[in-house]
């Protein structure tokens, strides 16, 4: 009887382990959501880079306009005060033009500075985003690596467990096996439990004190009085 109960206990542990492995395998993260997060971040990175390039082009354009305005002003100034203009009206017109160019120059300088700030901010944002992309890529690789390794482990373990699961019932008496199958269905997939520190490890209720001695050399099947599961003291 003792050996039969030990085999039944082994059967229970195998069934429990198979169930745990199958659940883990089904719930294992294959990295799809991390992949999606990475793709989104990469898309954002492209958009931000394009936006930065557009602002840089605007800045370049504004700098050229500023240079042109400065050149223009310099040439008007030389014209006005180079000693060749004697007509006061012509001089007045040139001075007006110079004043106009000065205002234009101030405005362009202001816009250039604003764009420079803008470029700097966007460069920082692009750099931050690039770091984020890098981080997400590493995270994805680690998830995928873990998925492959753990899948391999679980598949190998399940193969071994299922082989043993096929052999075991041949060594157990049909009536005991039938009790097991019925209890297994009824008792939340847990039919055989160990007595640990004088208590049933299925429902944690204390078992009668003489059970422990009787279970050390069992002559019959003893069940927990509370949850009706088969009790064993594992070897
Ligand atoms: Zn119990």
Image: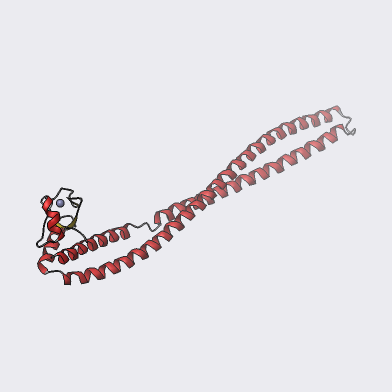
In the rendered image, the quadrant that contains the N terminus is bottom left
Q: Nearer the viewer, residue 133 or 92?
A: 133
On the rendered structure, is 127 left or right of 154?
right
Front one among 188 and 180: 180
Instruction: Describe residue 66's horizontal placement relative to residue 168 as left or right.
Output: right
Foreground pick, 89 / 37: 37
In the image, residue 111 above or below residue 221:
above
Q: Position of residue 76 (x, y in %)?
A: 81, 35
Tell me residue 223's x, y (percent). 11, 56
Percent of width and height locating residue 91? 84, 29
Give above or below for 105 relative to 53.
Answer: above
Residue at 32% over, 60% down: 25
Q: Quadrant of residue 14?
A: bottom left
Q: Quadrant of the C terminus?
A: bottom left
Most foreground residue, 44 or 21? 21
Asked whether, in this view, residue 5 is left or right of residue 21, the answer is left
Q: What scheme was used to colour the molecule?
A: secondary structure
Residue 19 coordinates in the image, percent (x, y): 25, 60
Give the residue displayed 72% in from the left and 31% down from the top: 103
Residue 119 figure quarter: top right
How many discs appear?
Answer: 0
Q: Is residue 45 above or below residue 159?
A: above
Residue pictured at 81% horizontal, 37% vertical: 74
Relative side of 29 to 105, left or right: left
């Amino acid at each position: 009887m003792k050996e039969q109960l030990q085999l039944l206990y082994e059967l229970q542990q195998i069934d429990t382990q198979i169930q745990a492995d199958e659940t883990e395998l089904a719930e294992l993260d294959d990295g799809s959501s991390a992949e999606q997060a990475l793709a989104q971040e990469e898309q954002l990175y492209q958009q931000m880079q394009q936006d930065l390039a557009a602002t840089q082009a605007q800045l370049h354009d504004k700098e050229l306009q500023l240079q042109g305005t400065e050149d223009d002003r310099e040439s008007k100034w030389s014209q006005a005060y180079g000693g060749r203009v004697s007509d006061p009206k012509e001089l007045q017109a040139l001075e007006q033009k110079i004043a106009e160019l000065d205002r234009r120059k101030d405005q362009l300088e202001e816009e250039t500075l604003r764009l420079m700030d803008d470029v700097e901010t966007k460069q920082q944002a692009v750099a931050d985003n690039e770091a984020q992309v890098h981080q997400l890529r590493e995270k994805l690789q680690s998830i995928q690596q873990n998925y492959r390794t753990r899948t391999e482990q679980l598949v190998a373990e399940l193969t071994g467990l299922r082989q043993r699961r096929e052999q075991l019932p041949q060594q157990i008496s049909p009536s005991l096996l039938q009790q097991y199958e019925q209890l297994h269905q009824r008792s939340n997939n847990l039919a055989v439990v160990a007595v640990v520190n004088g208590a049933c490890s299925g429902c944690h209720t204390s078992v009668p004190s003489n059970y422990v001695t009787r279970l050390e050399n069992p002559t019959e099947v003893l069940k927990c009085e509370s949850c009706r599961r088969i009790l064993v003291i594992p070897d």
